[in-house]
Amino acid sequence: MAEAKIEEGSISVSGQTLFFREAVPAQSSSRPPVLLLHGIRFSSQTWLELGTLYKLAAAGHRAVAIDLPGLGRSSDAKAPSPLGEPAPPSFIQDVLDALNMVPAAIISPSLSGMYSLSFVLNNPQNVAAYVPVAPICTDKFKAEDYRRAQFPALIVYGDGDEQLGEVSLNNLKNLPNSQVFCMKGAGHACYLDDPDTWHQKLLEFLGRLK
């Protein structure tokens, strides 16, 4: 099978220009598109180098990784909220609308929790699935906010993540349709510590979506 080609582009969101990388399946597929966000020390380049974009496309998913405001090749864009505070739900909604990928599965590590959580909890109808990887801001929402969200969720963290792993899990486990995957011997950016296990579990989870 030929490896997916990576396309680069930009979208305008609230007057800001955001860079993205995209991998499209070789054949048309009914599988949900996947939006990949990233942590503060990373960018869409991370998902390219790790091979996640290629693997998602090979499994039939259109995969788009964006550079969040102020980071990567979106460095000139201004964040819609202060660091560590939930962004308006409209931010990710506008991203998905601009990319024509509603509903989408959303992969959200670390810093990107400030963008993803407010969106998925306020617009669950536009979420095909949610894969939080020890995101920040989980404590900014109430247990009942999580309990109302019925989308499938795969909660991922590394057992060596002593900062955000357990904290985020304690809040995210209120998601009613969720499963937990603890990556053994992995730290905060657990997907980097064991890419093979990360990809296997992610693709298994996405493959079970209706």
Image (spheres, rainbow, N blue to C red):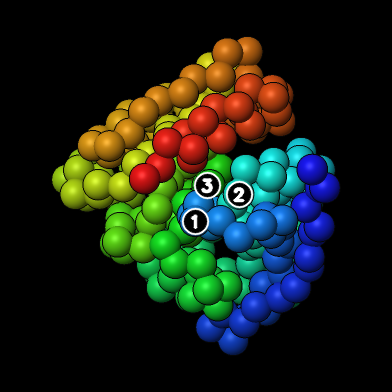
N-terminal of the pair, mark 2 or mark 3, is 2
* Image x and y of residue 28, in percent: 60, 60
- Looking at the rendered image, the quarter that the N terminus falls into is top right
Task: Say the numbered circle drawn on residue 60.
Answer: 2
The amino acid beneath tag 1 is: Ser
The amino acid beneath tag 3 is: Ser
Residue 119 visible to an observer of this rendering:
no
Q: How far apart are marks 2 and 1 (CA)?
A: 8 Å
Residue shown at the point (40%, 53%) measured from the top left: 128
Q: Nearer the viewer, residue 11 or 81?
A: 11
Q: Please rate how many residues cluster around mark 3, counting C-alpha atoms within 10 Å: few if below 14, some from 14 to 19, many from 20.
A: many
- Label 2 with label 1: CB-CB less than 8 Å: yes
Q: Please rate how many residues cluster around mark 2, counting C-alpha atoms within 10 Å: few if below 14, some from 14 to 19, many from 20.
A: some
Q: In this view, does 206 lie to the left or right of 50?
A: left
* Residue 165 higher or lower than 35, as above or below: above
Residue shown at the point (82%, 47%) measured from the top left: 2
Image quadrant in which you'd find residue 170: top left
From the image, tell me which residue sits under label 1. Answer: 30
From the image, tell me which residue sits under label 3. Answer: 108
Q: In this view, does 75 lie to the left or right of 130?
A: right
Q: Which of 31 and 161 is in front in this view?
A: 31
* Image x and y of residue 85, in percent: 44, 58
What residue occupies the far bottom of the structure in this picture?
15
**Which of labels 2 and 3 is toward the front?**
2
Q: In this view, does 193 lie to the left or right of 121?
A: right
- Looking at the rendered image, the quarter that the C terminus falls into is top left
Residue 20 visible to an observer of this rendering:
yes
Image quadrant in which you'd find residue 200: top right
Task: Say the numbered circle drawn on residue 67.
Answer: none
